[in-house]
Image (tube, helix red, strand yellow):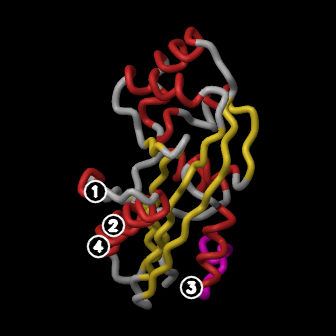
Amino acid sequence: MMTQFVLASASPARLKLLEMVGIKTIVCSSNYDESQINLSTTVDLVNTLAWKKAEIVAENFSDALVLGCDSVLEVDGEIYGKPNNPENAMKRWQKMRGKVGKLYTGHALIDTGKDQKIIRCGITEVFFANIDDSSIESYVSTGEPLKCAGSFALEGKGGLFVEKIVGCHSNVIGLSLPLLRIMLEDLNYKVTDFW
């Protein structure tokens, strides 16, 4: 029997990325309370959250690869997760516009059958357009930024307000596909095993 690939996340964007590259995926959200973790180092924060999410879900599978992910945006040394409300999203965009942020995505991959794990972090630079308040307000009113780390979705309307990115494109969406391929290889799998 083939090892199952499990995404420990309810993120539609992450699932879409996996489906886009042909990885047959079981979705099993961890429902992990992220407020339990408070770390000041961005890499430690996303890696720990990704690990915790994967660990919870991995307990339910005896022979599976379980992937947990977590993303945050860092601008001027400040860490941004999901904004939770329109006011926060508006304030964040007023700080972010015209600046360069770093999008960090922690990836934790657990092989429950072989009792192995790998944790890696992808980092991508995001150059934000210097947009005016009315554009920010219109964008926030769509509701899209409220569901996203850093208050924007590159694959949605938010892509209009990103001038360029340096690094992995899919990492900004929430899952670095090249990094996942490398992690699978490190655990002696090929990405094609899951097609």
CB atoms at circles 2 and 4 under 8 Å apart?
no
Percent coordinates x, y for residue 169 in the rendering: 69, 50
Q: Position of residue 74 (x, y in %)?
A: 52, 46
Categorize mark 2 by other alpha carbons within 10 Å: few (<14), some (14-19), many (20+): many
Q: Earlier in the sequence, mark 1 or mark 3?
A: 1
- Label 4 Cα neighbours within 10 Å, binned few <14 / some 14-19 / many ≥20: few
The answer to the question of whether label 1 and label 3 lie on touching residues, with beta carbons closer than 8 A, is no
The tag earlier along the polypeptide, 2 or 3, is: 2
Q: Residue furthest top?
A: 134
Which numbered disc flags the more N-terminal residue, 2 or 4? 2
Question: Where residue 179 is drawn, which disc sits there?
Answer: none
Judging by the rendered image, the residue that carries numbered circle 3 is 187
107 within the magenta span: no
Reading the image, the residue beneath label 2 is 52
Q: In 3D space, how far apart are the residues under numbered discs 1 and 3 (Cα atoms)?
A: 25 Å
Q: Marks 4 and 3, Cα distance to the nearest angstrom?
A: 20 Å
Give the residue type that dot 1 points to.
Answer: Tyr
Highlighted magenta segment, given as a residue range: 188-195
Residue type for callout 4: Asn
Please identify the quadrant where the C terminus is shown.
bottom right
Q: Amino acid at mark 3?
A: Leu
Alpha carbon separation for disc pair 2 and 1:
7 Å
Between tags 2 and 4, which lies in front? 2
Which residue is at 52% across, 81% downward? 2
Front-most of 65 and 169? 169
CB atoms of marks 2 and 1 within 8 Å: yes
Badges 4 and 1: C-beta atoms under 8 Å apart?
A: no
Per the image, the residue denoted by label 1 is 32
Ranked by sequence position, the earlier of labels 4 and 1 is 1
| 79 displayed left or right of 162 | left
* Mark 2 and mark 3: Cα distance apart in space: 19 Å
